[in-house]
Image (cartoon, rainbow, N blue to C red):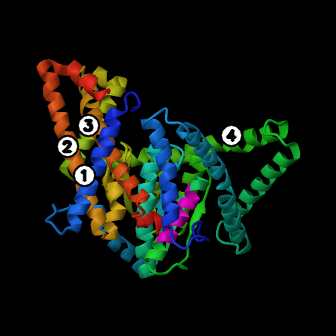
Amino acid sequence: MVAEGKINALAILVLTWALILYFQYRGKQGKKMPELRIPAAVKVIPQLVGRAIEMDRPIHFTSGTTGLNYTFTTATNAAGWSLLGYVSKICAELGGKIFATCARPDVYLMESEAIRAGNVLAGKPDYPIDVRYISPDAFAYQAAVIDMLKEEEVAVNVMVGFFYTEHLTIGHGAREAGAIGLGGTTNMDIFGLIPTNDYYLLGPENYAAGALLSGDEEMKNSFIGQDATIYVLLGILIIGVLAATAGYAEAILDLISM
Amino acid sequence: MSLLSIFKTRQPVIYILAICFAIPLIAMLFPGIPGVDSATSTLTSWNTIIMGFTFIPATLSLIIRNVKSVTTQKKGWIYEAWTLVVMVITFGVYFATQSITSVEYTFLFDAIYASSKPAVWGIIAMYMLIVPTYGFRLRNIEVAVFTIACCLVALMNAPIGAAIWSGFPAIGSWLVDWPYRGINYLISTLASLGALLMALRIIRGRERGLLG
């Protein structure tokens, strides 16, 4: 009934969702829940917005030059847009300026909606939405954004999404403009974000950032469920390694390729 | 204008979106269910159509912003004016020739777009070369380990590394094959779980940052 080779994927999907829903239910019951570590990059976001407002300089957001074209780019970019929504909520509440740039027309609409969602959450639905569609060409986009960062003397540069090379150029451009950098991605390009940004989000912290900023208890409990899944998978990993070392490698491979 | 403002509440739209997302997932996990494969293919076609329509608001926004810069004579307005001129010429040539393989359109592409692209790449490539220098400031133990590992991998790839000492390629290969690959898999696995969680939040309408 299940597609060949997808049983493991289905099992992990069901396990993840079951654990998330369980911990959300447990949280609603008021039972004791494990403490969640808030990443430093998430804790500092309100201070960064405050800094930008004090200096009367805008905040810039980009999620790179990819968009909704591939699954792996969509997920990471969606995390960035979610963070954009919460950052723009804080901006609207405090009266700051934020503008987002994009290289794809579908991203233009997503970023517009994210900023609009943030304005609605802040209770200011008419707050300005500034999203700038530049060019689908990566180099033209990077050149235009670097110019904008310097021209408008951006105070904070937020780069959360899927990047190819633009995080290096835009990150350095932001540094030259004197902006504080906050970067995040879920692939190995994080190593390019770390040198150019003062704060960074690693891997799953990108997905958590927006939700942690919201302060929603139910969403925080869902992250505990996610962490529980990670522990289960780590346990399976250790058992697999020990079994493979003991000579059951073939059986393990057959099991994981079900 | 919000795309969803025609609905009084967002919940019905979120349920419709959840069904649209669930259909390809079911098609992937449970093949052979009648109607699901054709529904997936229909959804994919509609996705392409919607993506095509997104060009309209984005391009209009680009034109409006550039026209505003030109009319208010903002600093550097001449570049926005040139952007508008090139857009008009490109649209004009396409509508006149009705073909992207015509001599005129191909000349435009080769003379303006294709020749300026490597020029811009050459200019901004300097930024990419400067970035690694940030990593060379050994301000704490983690950055120091990172920088030393980068140097070892660089020596693996450069012929001079093997010339200096035969151990550099071996150490670099080990770093790439074991720690890097292992951490890559770990980050990918964790990121995938995070994406699953995000998908659940969006489907349930709890992702306020995106959905409002």
Residue on which disc 3 sits: B149
Q: Is the residue at mark 3 from the same chain as the one at mark 2?
A: no
**Chain that bears disc 2:** A
Give amino acid for label 1: Leu
Q: Residue B192: where, in percent of width, then height?
A: 35, 45
Viewer-proximal residue among B155 and A210: A210
Q: Quadrant of residue B74?
A: bottom right
Q: Is the residue at mark 1 from the same chain as the one at mark 4?
A: no
Give amino acid for label 4: Ala
Instruction: Please give left or right for residue B85 compared with residue A68 in the image.
Output: right
* Badge number at residue B114: 4
Neighbour tally class for label 1: few under 14, some 14-19, many 20 plus, Cα within 10 Å: some
Residue depicted at x 39% and y 33%: A2
The overriding secondary structure of the stretch rendered in magenta is helix
Earlier residue among tags 4 and 3:
4
Residue depicted at x 27% and y 63%: A220
Q: Which residues are magenta?
A: A107-117
In the image, residue B178 sits, relative to residue B5, either above or below, namely above
Q: Is A211 included in the stretch rendered in magenta?
A: no
Give amino acid for label 2: Val
Neighbour tally class for label 2: few under 14, some 14-19, many 20 plus, Cα within 10 Å: some
**Chain that bears disc 3:** B
Earlier residue among tags 1 and 2:
1
